[in-house]
C-alpha cells in the first residue's frame, strides 16, 4: 500500500469515528438534560414549560432506561437539594446523593427487573397529591422494570418474551407483547401516582418516536405530558453539521430505517450506486433499527449483521468506509458497538480464509469482524437513540 492510499484509509477510518461521536454527543444525557432542565429563585423550567416553585411541595425524580443513571445524575447537578427523592434504574452500579439508584438488566428481563420495579413502585407511593415529579424515560426500560400480570409466573413471562425477542420482530411488536403481559407497562405505572403534577421527558429509541412504544409506555396513560428531548434526528443533524464542509454532498437519507438487515443491505447498495454516479465524495447518514432473526449460536447483533451483509453484497467501493453502530454502545449479545468496513476487508477475507456466508448463517457476525479486525467497540454510552449507519466516501485530504 503506497503512502497516499494508507493516509486516506486512516483518514477515513478516523473521520467516520468522529462523525459517530459527534452524533452521539448531540444526544448525550448531560447535554439533553442541560438543554431541558433549569431552575431559578421562583421557577422550575422543564423542556420549555415553566412551573412556579410555590405551586408544589416536594420534587421527586425518576429515571429508567439505558440513560437512566446519566440523566438522573445530570438532573442532580442542576436541581441539587431541591430533590426530595426518587429512583434511577439503569445498567450502572453507582450511587447518587438525592436519588436512589438501582441496577437492572437488559435485554432479557430478570429477577433484578422485578426487584427494580418493586423499589420504583414503593418510591412512587411517597409522592403526595401536592408534590411534583419529573420522569426520565429512555430505551431499555421495558426490560429493566417488570411486574407480570396476576396469574402469570415470572418463568412463563420470561419464556414468552425471550421467544419473541429472538424471533426478529421489530420493537413495536415486541413491546405490544410486553404491555399485555405486564402490570406496569402501557400507562399502568402512571396510574399509581397520586399527584397531577408531573412531566415525562423521553429519549426516543424507536422509529417515529412512538410514545406508545418507547419503554413499553409505562407512564403513557394520558394524564402526564410526554416531551421528546432526544432522538435519532437530533443526533444525525449534529453529525451532518460536522462533516458537510468536508465532502461534496452530505445527506440524512432517513432517521426511520425500519426493515430487515437483508432488505436494508440491498437498499444501501442501491443508494451507493446512485451517489457514486453523481459525487466523488459524500457522506450518507441513516438512522433507525433493522431487524434480524437469530439463526445460530454465534455472537453478534443487528449492526454487525448489517455490516456483514454489506460485505457479502459487495457494497464497499474504493475510498469508502461504512460504519454500522448502535448509539447505546451495545450490539446484540456481543461486546461490540458495531462494525466498520472498507475495501481492504476483501483482502483480509482471502488472507484469513474466512467465509462471510458461514458467519451469517450462524448469526456470528461479531466473530467475523473480530477476526478481520473491523469490530467497533465503545462500551456503554449512557444514551440510546437507535442505530447510526454512516457511509463516507472521501478522496480529499482533511483541511
Image (cartoon, helix red, strand yellow):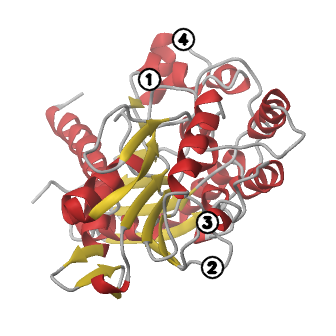
The answer to the question of whether label 3 and label 1 lie on touching residues, with beta carbons closer than 8 A, is no
Residue name at image x 57 percent, y 27 percent: 333
Q: Position of residue 329 (x, y in %)?
A: 42, 40
Q: Residue farthest to the right?
A: 151
Sooner in the amino-acid sequence: mark 1 or mark 2? 2
Residue topped by disc 2: 223
Q: Is residue 353 above or below residue 377?
A: above
Q: Residue farthest to the left?
A: 399
Of circles 3 and 1, the one toward us is 3
**Left or right for 246, reference 334:** left
The front one of 124 and 32 is 124
Residue topped by disc 4: 353
Would you identify the image quadrant in which residue 189 lies? Answer: bottom right
Residue topped by disc 3: 219
The answer to the question of whether label 3 and label 4 lie on touching residues, with beta carbons closer than 8 A, is no
Q: Position of residue 191 (x, y in %)?
A: 67, 67
- In which quadrant of the rendered image does the C terminus lie? bottom left
Q: Is residue 298 above or below residue 280?
A: above
Sooner in the amino-acid sequence: mark 4 or mark 2? 2
Would you identify the image quadrant in which residue 60 lies? Answer: bottom left
- In which quadrant of the rendered image does the N terminus lie? top left
- Mark 2 nearby-residue class (10 Å; few <14, some 14–19, many ≥20): some
Of circles 1 and 2, the one toward us is 2
Amino acid at each position: 500500500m503506497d503512502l497516499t492510499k494508507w493516509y486516506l484509509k486512516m483518514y477515513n477510518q478516523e473521520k467516520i469515528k468522529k462523525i459517530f461521536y459527534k452524533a452521539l454527543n448531540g444526544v448525550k444525557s448531560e447535554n439533553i438534560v442541560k438543554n431541558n432542565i433549569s431552575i431559578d429563585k421562583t421557577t422550575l423550567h422543564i423542556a420549555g414549560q415553566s412551573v412556579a416553585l410555590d405551586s408544589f411541595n416536594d420534587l421527586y425524580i425518576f429515571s429508567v432506561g439505558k440513560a437512566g443513571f446519566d440523566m438522573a445524575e445530570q438532573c442532580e447537578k442542576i436541581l441539587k437539594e431541591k430533590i426530595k427523592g426518587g429512583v434511577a434504574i439503569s445498567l450502572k452500579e453507582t450511587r447518587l446523593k438525592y436519588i436512589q439508584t438501582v441496577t437492572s438488566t437488559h435485554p432479557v428481563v430478570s429477577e433484578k427487573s422485578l426487584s427494580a420495579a418493586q423499589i420504583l413502585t414503593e418510591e412512587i407511593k411517597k409522592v403526595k397529591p401536592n408534590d411534583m415529579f419529573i420522569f426520565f424515560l429512555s430505551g431499555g426500560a421495558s426490560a429493566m422494570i417488570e411486574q407480570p400480570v396476576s396469574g402469570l409466573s415470572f418463568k412463563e413471562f420470561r419464556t414468552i418474551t425471550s421467544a419473541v425477542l429472538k424471533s426478529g420482530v421489530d420493537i413495536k411488536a415486541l413491546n405490544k407483547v410486553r404491555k399485555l403481559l405486564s402490570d406496569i407497562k402501557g400507562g399502568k405505572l402512571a396510574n399509581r401516582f397520586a399527584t397531577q403534577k408531573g412531566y415525562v421527558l423521553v429519549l426516543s429509541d424507536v422509529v417515529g418516536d412512538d410514545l406508545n412504544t418507547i419503554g413499553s409506555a409505562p407512564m403513557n396513560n394520558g394524564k402526564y405530558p410526554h416531551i421528546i428531548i432526544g432522538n435519532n434526528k437530533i443526533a444525525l443533524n449534529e453529525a451532518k453539521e460536522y462533516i458537510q464542509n468536508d465532502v461534496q454532498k452530505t445527506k440524512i437519507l432517513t432517521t426511520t430505517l425500519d426493515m430487515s438487515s437483508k432488505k436494508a443491505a440491498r437498499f444501501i447498495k442501491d443508494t451507493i450506486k446512485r451517489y457514486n454516479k453523481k459525487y466523488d465524495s459524500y457522506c450518507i447518514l441513516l438512522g433507525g433499527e433493522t431487524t434480524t432473526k437469530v439463526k445460530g449460536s454465534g455472537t453478534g447483533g443487528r449492526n454487525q449483521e448489517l455490516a456483514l451483509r454489506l460485505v457479502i453484497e459487495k457494497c464497499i467501493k474504493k475510498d469508502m468506509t461504512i460504519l454500522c453502530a448502535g448509539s447505546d454502545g451495545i450490539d446484540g449479545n456481543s461486546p461490540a458497538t458495531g462494525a466498520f468496513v472498507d475495501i481492504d476487508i476483501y483482502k483480509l477475507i482471502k488472507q484469513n480464509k474466512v467465509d462471510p456466508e458461514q458467519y451469517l448463517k450462524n448469526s456470528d457476525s461479531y466473530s467475523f469482524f473480530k477476526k478481520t479486525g473491523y469490530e467497533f467497540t465503545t462500551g456503554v454510552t449512557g444514551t440510546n437513540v437507535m442505530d447510526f449507519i454512516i457511509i463516507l466516501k472521501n478522496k480529499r485530504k482533511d483541511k
